[in-house]
Amino acid sequence: MSRIDDLIQELSPGGVAFKTLGDVGTFIRGNGLQKSDLTDEGFPAIHYGQVHTHYGTWATETISFTSPDFAAKLRKAEPGDLVIATTSEDDQAVGKAVAWLGEAATAVSGDAFIYQHSLDPKYVSYFFQCEQFQGQKMRSITGTKVRRISGDSLAKIKIPVPPVEVQREIVRVLDSFSTLEAELKTELKTELKARRQQYVHYRHLLLTFPDDVPRAALGEVSTKVSSGGTPSSGRAEYYDGGIPWLRTQEVNYNRITTTGMTITEQGLKNSSAKWIPEHCVIVAMYGATAAKVAINEIPLTTNQACCNLQVDPAKAEYRYVFHWVANEYERLKALGEGSQSNLNAQKVKNYPIPVPSLERQREIVSILDNLDSLVNDLSQGLPAELSARRTQYEYYRDKLLTFREAAV
């Protein structure tokens, strides 16, 4: 930051001028471009929704195109302009901007503004992310479910306008922060992938048994096998009660300590859902998570697409059964039917499992639980580390974009 301080002292010793976005540029609304108009090739095009989902601070290429004939009718951002999404259901996302730095113009949809200005484009785009902009913007957002901001409101927002040399130095520093953040994210994800591969490798080794180890069906090592039920939809009195209700999409090799939905006593009576005790092995039978497995750490109820195994502790360790079913995912899923490989309770109940001594099962569980913890600790640490870096980045970005205002 000393380089920036030196530049300000040299080029703007009396402080930095603050101007409105309308003073240094013009807002032009995009037009006409719908998602259905987007193609894989043709004239470059940016739809406002893509500003939220695909683009960062700046872009040199579009991910979508439209036909040249149709593009001729559309308003376009020239290189150096900003493309600003003006609507969102999230106040924080209203006014998200991307600096267009491509070699030629790009067509822009409605619900977006093209901002033509006289500043460094990346500098302005970084400003649109900072707390100064967010604080001013919030006062002008309108709408109920869909939130929006007008061009007139954006034009009144004040932006510090240091000399262009300072703008470019700020951009250089913030670009380097962004690069470091991306490198860290890649490094941590690579480490997580390696640990997961290691875990799967050792799990397979530990769960490969000689022929003399007894086999049984999952139903034979369980005291009870059941599935749940779903209360009638559209009945408010059946939902948002105090009874945890698990859906298949929540089953993902995890320990269930809470559920995304709850039902009421009336909902429980209306459906075939039943309470199951903690430490059941729950196998998803339908949909995208079919054949995936979880363990409930709390008593709960489930929908009908969950097969719930209450493991007999005299025959098997429930964590051993969990690890076995997780290891058998591909083979168990192959027994499913239809486009989503849906299972049924009978197939799960009849699926074979080796049953070594309880002592050996506990040894296997201890090793796999430790390996699982290593993976999960990093998995939980990854977003925490990235969040910490993001917070640090945002702090320095806001600091870099804070100036003493020059006297008028």
Image: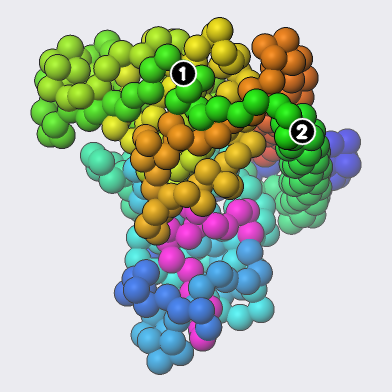
Q: Position of residue 362 (x, y in %)?
A: 71, 13
Asked if the residue at tag 1 contacts the one at tag 2, i.e. Cβ–Cβ closer than 8 Å, the answer is no
Residue holding disc 1: 222
Q: Nearer the viewer, residue 129 or 230?
A: 230
Name the residue rendered at 50%, 47% in the picture.
Answer: 333
The answer to whether any part of residue 277 appears in the image is: yes
Query: For numbered disc 2, what is the local secondary structure?
Result: loop
Q: Give the number of the mark in front: 2 or 1.
A: 2
Magenta-highlighted residues:
42-58
Name the residue rendered at 20%, 24% in the picture.
Answer: 272
- State left or right for residue 61 relative to residue 283: right
Residue 46 forms part of the magenta stretch: yes
* Image height of 128 relative to 380, above or below: below
Mark 2 to mark 1: distance in Å? 23 Å
Residue holding disc 2: 210
Residue that lies at the very extreme toward the bottom in this rendered image: 69
Looking at the image, is mark 2 or mark 1 earlier in the sequence? Answer: 2
Q: Position of residue 374 (x, y in %)?
A: 76, 24
The answer to whether any part of residue 375 appears in the image is: no
On-image quarter of the C terminus: top right
Q: Kindly identify the amino acid type of the residue bearing the numbered disc 2.
A: Pro
Query: For numbered disc 1, what is the local secondary structure?
Result: strand
Q: Quadrant of residue 191?
A: top right
Q: Kindly identify the amino acid type of the residue bearing the numbered disc 1.
A: Ser
